[in-house]
Amino acid sequence: MILHTDILVIGAGGAGARAAIEAAMREPGLKITILNQGPIGKSGLTSMANGGMQWVEHPDDSPDFLFGDILRFGCFLNDQNLVEALTQEGPQRAQELIDWGAQMISFSRGSRGGSPSGQDKRPSYPRGHYIPGVTYMKALRNEMSRHANITVFEDVLTTRLITSDNRVTGAFVLSIRTGEYFIVAAKATLLASGGLGEIYPHSTNAPFGMHGHAAGMGYAMAYRAGAELIDMEMVQFTGNQLYPPWLLGNPELLCMMCGGQYINALGDEFIQQPQPRDVIQRSAYKEIKEGRGTERGGVFIDLTKSPLSSEEIEEQLKHSLAVEIAKERWELIKRMSVNDPDPKNWRIEFTPGGAHFFMGGVRIDEKCRTNLEGLFAAGEVSGGVHGANRMGGNAMVEIIVFGARAGRYAAEYAKGEKEVGFEDPSKQEYERLCSFFRDKGTPPKAIMDRIAAFMSEYVGVARRETDLKKALSELESVRADDLPKMRAPSGRCFNLGWIEAIQVPCMLDVAQMIIMSALHRTESRGAHFREDFPETKSEWLKHTRVIKKSDQMELGTTPVVITKLNPEGRI
């Protein structure tokens, strides 16, 4: 079956939902089709996000100041045309979200948590706002429902972009509910499929092991179609909580909001806040590597040393958990906190290397266009906005700013295009997917675990050429030995084992892009730390570039777009 639409949106988190709304508002006569792997608003990463956002509001602040802060945090690897859009349009997009019903909770300004300031370590003005992901997505879903020209397909998996003469003309889609497939032919295709944290064993993208929505399929599909991807080595890590196993999410909030201290196993504070995430992760890694870690292989966030009282800490934590919206979360946290209800007595053990966010991705311009005609991208699957290190609070703004931009320009493109015919690849693609059914073999989850293990060991917070080559060797071994034996369990309706089997080859492609890009960049910059090349080099102020050529992964570089600032000052 072939369905015809004007605009196809793959992914309905914040970026995809906002793109569909924008396209529907601007061109009510166009047909817009959304494909989402689960129920919209109740699956994916946006709905799970704590919801911190940055935009200019202080009377003495300006978008130019925010622009400079983002470049410093990103080590100037950001494409400045994209940063300009982010800083200029963020307040308007956020206000629209609030007008549609999203609930904003003001950050508390009274916390005495946090330590020394510094232009290189924290934003130049307070810009924190808080729209929890659950209310963020509820507002977008409700707004989408108002537009009759938007058609939604939930519980579907997009497995392939269809191309014709270097143009993307649609996608192959598998129904998770029925196991049947269909084709969507589109004048414009918009990729908003989210991140790839699940290629690491610990990730904020997959709490409690709830896998399946951050396997990196969007990156792999774009790569296989011929799209250019940049900065694939830039993985932002955060602490992975070892003990107690609770629901807070990012343990760094215990320092940022509650005044906790980073303490090693000897009881010594090893870094003071505020610091960028990459600095914190490398410092914790160093403590553990040099023998000052715990028996579990971690270090501590110690709230006993906070200047705040128990009541003040509790108030800050309730705030970070949006207790106004989800009251039960705080009580659940307290019940899981080692039989001690007083947070002032908590010492939280964590280890560095939990995958949190991905700065690289499909390269876009300010109109969210890729190098492939007819293909647009927005959100975490795209690259160039955050450079080498994302500043906290910018992800949730990025998805609505560039979601709206992608929707606007995809609508303009689709309005002026005629429908393009293509050779239907559905028979071959479905046969490929069904080839994972066999009588015996290796479960896909076992292969996923092997990928995650070598990515964690060799391509984590600190990297070296010898380790990266070991990772590449492990990856090639998985391709040669495990992949041909991979077995999906029988059954085609809601068969999550089959979905995992489909995702595994994509995860291998993405892992290879990260490894090869990390090998290629022979310097340290932001989230990419090479122990064998610890310095940042001016000659490496350029993007790494990955593209598929003659069925091979080709590595290279491409210039960073610089419009206003460079590391030496204004230009």
Image (cartoon, helix red, strand yellow):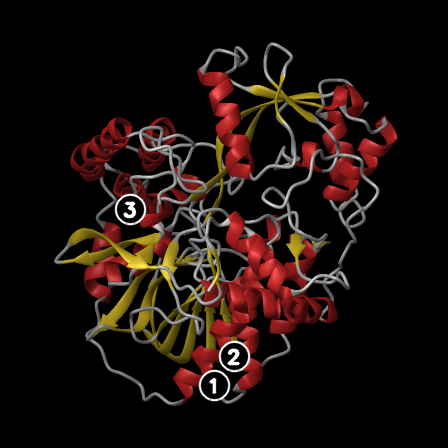
Q: Residue shown at 83%/29% (left/top)?
A: 308
Image spot of residue 295 (x, y percent): 52, 10
* Mark 2 vs mark 1: in front: 2
Amino acid type, residue under disc 1 in the picture:
Leu
N-terminal of the two: label 2 or label 1? 2
* Tag of residue 513: 3
Residue toward you, 314 or 233: 233
* Mark 3 vs mark 1: in front: 3
In the rendered image, the quadrant that contains the N terminus is: bottom left
Determine whether label 2 and label 1 are within 8 Å by CB: yes
* Tag of residue 23: 2
Residue toward you, 40 or 406: 406
Image spot of residue 345 (x, y percent): 77, 19
Q: Residue shown at 38%/36% (left/top)?
A: 535
Amino acid type, residue under disc 2 in the picture:
Ala
Amino acid type, residue under disc 3 in the picture:
Met
* Tag of residue 30: 1
Q: For residue 14, say whether it is visible.
A: no
Which quadrant of the structure image shows residue 218?
Answer: bottom left
Which quadrant of the structure image shows residue 446?
Answer: top left
Give the structural element (helix, strand or loop) at label 2.
helix
Q: CA separation, marks 2 and 1?
A: 8 Å
Give the structural element (helix, strand or loop) at label 3.
helix
Q: CA separation, marks 3 and 1?
A: 36 Å
Q: For residue 58, say whether it is visible.
A: yes
Q: Residue shown at 42%/46% (left/top)?
A: 196
Image spot of residue 534 (x, y percent): 37, 32
Q: Residue shown at 27%/47% (left/top)?
A: 509
